[in-house]
Image: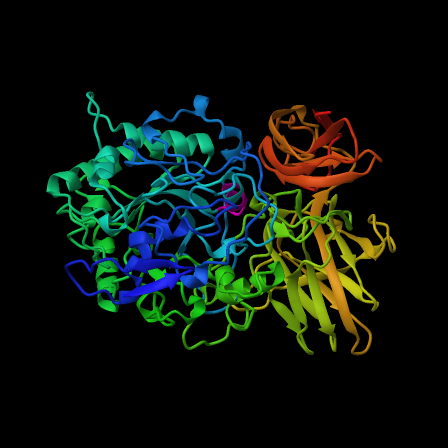
Amino acid sequence: MSETDHGVERRTPPAPSGPIPLRPTRRRVLAAGAGAAALLGVAGRARAATAAEATLPAAAAPEPVVPEPVPAGPAPYASYWFPDSLPAGTPGPGIVWRSLSRWSPEDDPDLAHNTATVPLAQRFTPVPANRTARAGQARIASLVSFAPTAGNPAQGSPTADYYALTHWAYIDELVFWGGSAGEGIVLAPNAPVVDAAHRNGVRVLGNVFLPPVAYGGDLRWTRDLVRRDRLGRFPIAEQLVRVARTYGFDGWFVNAETDGGDSALATRMREFLRALRAAGEPHGLRITWYDAMNSTGRVGWQGALNALNQEFYEDRAGKVADTMFVDFRWTPDTLAASGALADRLGRSRHELWAAVDTESRGWDADVHWDAIVPRSGDHVVSYGFYRPEWTRNHLTDRSPGAFHHADDRFWTGESLDPARPAVEASWRAPATAVADRSTVAGLPFACSFNTGHGLRWYENGEVSSDTPWNHLGLQDRLPGRRWVVDTAGTRPSVTLDFADAWRGGSSLLVSGSLTAPVAVGLHSTRLPLTRGSVVELVHATGPAPVTVEVGVATREPSAPGDPVPYTWLRTGSTGAGAAGAAGWRTARAALAPLAGRTAYALAVRITAPGSTAVAWRLGALSVHDGARTRRPAPPVAPAVDAAARQDGRAWLRLSWRAAGSGPGGRPRHYEVHRVLPDGGRRFLGGTCGTALYLPGVARAGRERAAVFEVRAVDELYAVSAPARTTLPWEP
């Protein structure tokens, strides 16, 4: 079978011996999916087509955008390598072949840009929003390709067209999917993805992809990976642990699909996995093994945990891998047998991810759901989503609003309300089966409903940059349940909206005719309340007057699906414009009457007179103790580390030393602004780390130097005093 994708022919590789796959068109899913990932958006660079790259589904391939030429400048990208040996020939344009065996942090020019800084947050599981979602059973692994292997920006990019996933509440593990024989087969996740995931308690794994021979795979790369040194150690295992610890992510997804091995190679692979786990376990690192190579050393996808692949998951000496991604060839019988074998091994059956292909058809995928998460009875195993970024890739309109509408539909279901799930014939949305989780367990807490991308950047309700952007590290901890709405009247629209915001790129918009009061559930929390605790809202009422109340639940529902028992508090308003911009208001409610209790959930309730049509925005929500008077400590010694100039524009790397902890703790993130000759300020970007790449900064008139300010931002979005540096322009 052959198809065309923008003129590049792609072919399904020869079918392997063994069982016929359940989804014959998906033979290439994991066999070459990482190579396919290499073509997702070429980051402005021409890419030579390789065999491994020729597998991208048409639905996932946007028309390439040809940008203006830029100098070969200092842009940093996510790191990728070969284990040791490099391919023969010459790499394609924009590709750099690197050997992991020779990597060291000291020689890594992109280290500061690729290092995640947000620690992995602890999670808790609230009482589920509906009676079908089950706590402590099925979980979700998500394999996502965010950008090309060789052109994956390390620090966001100036476009809003990005897979800015926000439904972390249902995800347990995210694999940073990518790699190809023409670029590199070991891929480390970039810092923004790791920082966003960690803020929500989700682990992120890098990807080790040993591609099939049909897609350029070479068995010497497998042998390089599992090679021992003269002391019997596995140097690449040690390097993988070193990379994960240095960059700040959580382990590796190991996918060995290069055929031609033997039982001795399989034994060496198992020993390598044991060494990798032994070296990583003290640091909290994890391994997920993909069901491909089996104990014969050949590639034979089982679609099960069974005697042929068990030794890569659990052998006689104990645990080898933490989880296993079960190939798409599974059947109800093989999953049932896999779960039973996991039970006998003393392992959780929910450590098995049953592959669910969403790359091509998304929520129209043909899946035997009862084999994974039956509606009645215990869950058999867990979900393993392959390429859920379909929610973005399949769209004709890829605006942020259209993407989030599709993504909400994918994770929550057709009803768009996890407390009232729709019964769907072909799709079993995660919210209907898997209990959501949260990390909102300490004060201070704030959310500005920023999704990590936008059409503009807002500060205090005003536009401080009109350039589209994405950077997941700036994303807030958003409500996990999108959206639980209670009303006796007509249900209004509740969305994340990008037409206006208080801070960041988006706000929560409630729109429609309010025929009765409307309560919108927000965050599940575990917040200890004191006599000084205050809840604060920044909101814009729009043309119609509304009454706003905040809901605080000091106990959980008695059973899944029961309503959350909120205590409703009227909020006093400081009047229009008091929050900093016309139309936005700050409203506060003291929580002293609830002192000594725990807030288990937060909500808002709005009421309008009659059947008034409203467009009410929530720009920020915070809970904190005492007055917000202290500012974080500023960053130290900002400097331009490298720059390329061309035609009155500059592409540069900026870095600084971390701010001290200050009265509000460590900074949440840093923001960089350009100071214009007239004294105005323009937002250029932000990051959780201490380095940022700034592309295409234009000279303002005939200014002699561009002036940059770096500020630290705390958990309540208070900003520090600025630290300044400059970039001289050439005469």
Q: Say if residue 18 shows up in the picture.
A: yes
Q: Is residue 367 above or below residue 587?
A: below
Residue 639 lies in quadrant: top right
Which quadrant of the rendered structure holds the N terminus?
bottom left
Which residue is depicted at the point 26% across and 33% down? Answer: 275
Give 614 or 74, whichever is nearer the viewer: 74
Q: In the image shown, does 39 or 517 lie closer to the viewer?
A: 39
| Residue 646 in picture, x, y percent from top left | 64, 33
Which secondary structure type mostly characterizes the magenta part of the structure? helix
Residue at image coords 81%, 55%:
584
Residue 199 falls within the magenta-colored stretch? yes
Q: Residue 590: image x %, image y %?
A: 77, 50
> Quarter holding the C terminus?
top right
Q: Position of residue 50 (x, y in %)?
A: 34, 48
- Tally the marks: 0
Reply above or below: 617 against 313.
below
Q: Is residue 522 found left or right of 189 in the rendered image? A: right
Image x and y of residue 16, in percent: 18, 58
Range of magenta residues:
194-201
Image coloring type: rainbow
Q: Residue at x 20, y 57 (%)?
A: 302
Q: Can the viewer see residue 558 in this picture?
A: no
Look at 86% across and 52% down and name the residue there: 577
**Left or right placement of residue 578 versus residue 456 in this view:** right
Please say whether residue 655 is one of the residues in the magenta stretch: no
